[in-house]
C-alpha cells in the first residue's frame, strides 16, 4: 500500500443536459490530473440535476446506454488515475432508477459500484419537499474496494447521517471514505461540515466529499463546500461556493496514528435497549 496520495474533489453546478455535464466533468478531471492528482472524485448527480418532477426518470439512460461510463473509463485509463464518479442516475426500469456511484481504476475498468442506500425523503423549512424514493430504488450493500492506497468506502450524500454505515465501512477496511453529495443549502449550511468531520473522527480515516453547488433547474440550490478531511477531523481543503477543484496530499500513516491515539473502533461493547 502506497503511503502518500494526492487527491482531488471536483465541485460542479450540474444542469439538466447530460452531454454538457459530462463535458464539464471531463474538463475538471483533466485539470486535476494535470496537477498530479492520483484519485479524483466528482459529486452526486455528475451526469445531470433535474428539478422537474419525473424528468430524471424520463431522461436517465439504462446503464448499458449511459455515455458517462465509456467516457470516464477511457478518461481514467488515458490519464492513469483512479476516478470516483460520485453518482450517475441509471434507469433500472420504466419506473425506477439507481443513484449509482462508479469507481474506475487507472486501467479504465469499473473497480466497484455502489447504489445509495438511504433515500432523501424530507420536508424542509423552506417549504421544499424531496422524495428520492419515488424514482430511486435504494441499495442494500455496503462497499469497500481495494485501491493502491488502501480501502475506499463508498457512500452518497444523505448516507452521511447514518454513522453506523461508516463504522461498518471502516471496520471492513476503509482507509478513505467517499461522500459525494448534492446537499441542499439549508441542511448544508447547518450540518455539512460537522457531519463530515464527525465521520472522519469516529473512524480515523480520510474523507473525500465532492459536492454540487449553486442553482439548478427548478430553482433547487446546493451548498457546495466540497471538502477533504484528515483522520483527526481537520479540514484540509474547502471548495467554497464556486465550481472548480480542490486538492490535498494525504499521508496515509495518519490513519494509524489517529487510531492509536483514539482506538474507538476497538472499543465496541454489546448493550441492550
Image (cartoon, rainbow, N blue to C red):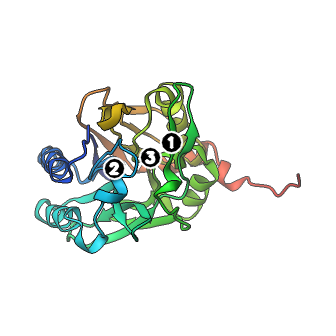
Place residue 161 in its image quadrant: top right
Q: Nearer the viewer, mark 1 or mark 3?
A: 1
Residue in the foreground of this view, choosing between 233 and 211: 211
Residue 126 position in % (x across, y down): 51, 25
Residue 64 picture quarter:
bottom left
Q: Which residue is mark 2?
A: 45
Residue 15 at x, y percent in the picture: 24, 42
Label 1 near label 2: C-beta < 8 Å? no
Q: Is residue 45 above or below residue 270?
A: above
Question: At 21% from the left edge and 53% from the top edge, which residue is drawn?
Answer: 18
The percent coordinates of residue 144 (x first, y second) are 47, 65
Cα distance between the residues tagged 2 and 1: 15 Å
Residue 205 or 140: which is nearer the viewer? 140
Residue highlighted by disc 3: 206
Residue at figure coordinates x 18%, y 52% from the top left = 22
Q: Which residue is mark 1?
A: 130
Which residue of the protein is positioned furthest toward the right in this rendering? 272
For the residue labelled by badge 2, is the local secondary structure a helix, a strand or a loop?
loop
Q: Is residue 223 left or right of residue 204?
A: left
Instruction: Look at 50% across and 63% down and name the residue there.
Output: 137
Horizontal side of 140 relative to 20 (left or right) equals: right
Q: Position of residue 207 (x, y in %)?
A: 44, 45
Which secondary structure, mark 1? Answer: strand
Amino acid at each position: 500500500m502506497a503511503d502518500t496520495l494526492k487527491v482531488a474533489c471536483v465541485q460542479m453546478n450540474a444542469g439538466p443536459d447530460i452531454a454538457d455535464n459530462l463535458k464539464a466533468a471531463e474538463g475538471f478531471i483533466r485539470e486535476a490530473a494535470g496537477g498530479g492528482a492520483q484519485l479524483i472524485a466528482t459529486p452526486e448527480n455528475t451526469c445531470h440535476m433535474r428539478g422537474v418532477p419525473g424528468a430524471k426518470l424520463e431522461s436517465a439512460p439504462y446503464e448499458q446506454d449511459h455515455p458517462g461510463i465509456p467516457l470516464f473509463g477511457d478518461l481514467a485509463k488515458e490519464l492513469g488515475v483512479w476516478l470516483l464518479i460520485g453518482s450517475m442516475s441509471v434507469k433500472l426500469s420504466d419506473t425506477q432508477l439507481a443513484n449509482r456511484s462508479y469507481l474506475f481504476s487507472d486501467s479504465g475498468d469499473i473497480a466497484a459500484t455502489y447504489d445509495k442506500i438511504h433515500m432523501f425523503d424530507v420536508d424542509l423549512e423552506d417549504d421544499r419537499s424531496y422524495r428520492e424514493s419515488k424514482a430511486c430504488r435504494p441499495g442494500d450493500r455496503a462497499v469497500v474496494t481495494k485501491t493502491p492506497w488502501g480501502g475506499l468506502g463508498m457512500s452518497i450524500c444523505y448516507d452521511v447521517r447514518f454513522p453506523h454505515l461508516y463504522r461498518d465501512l471502516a471496520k471492513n477496511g476503509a482507509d478513505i471514505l467517499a461522500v459525494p453529495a448534492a446537499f441542499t443549502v439549508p441542511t448544508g449550511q447547518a450540518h455539512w461540515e460537522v457531519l463530515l468531520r464527525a465521520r472522519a473522527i469516529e473512524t480515523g480515516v480520510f474523507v473525500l466529499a465532492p459536492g454540487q453547488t449553486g442553482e439548478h433547474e427548478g430553482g433547487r440550490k446546493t451548498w457546495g463546500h466540497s471538502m477533504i478531511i484528515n483522520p483527526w477531523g481537520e479540514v484540509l481543503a474547502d471548495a467554497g461556493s464556486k465550481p472548480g477543484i480542490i486538492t490535498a496530499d494525504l499521508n496515509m500513516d495518519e490513519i494509524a496514528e489517529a487510531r492509536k491515539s483514539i482506538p474507538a473502533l476497538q472499543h465496541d461493547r454489546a448493550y441492550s435497549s
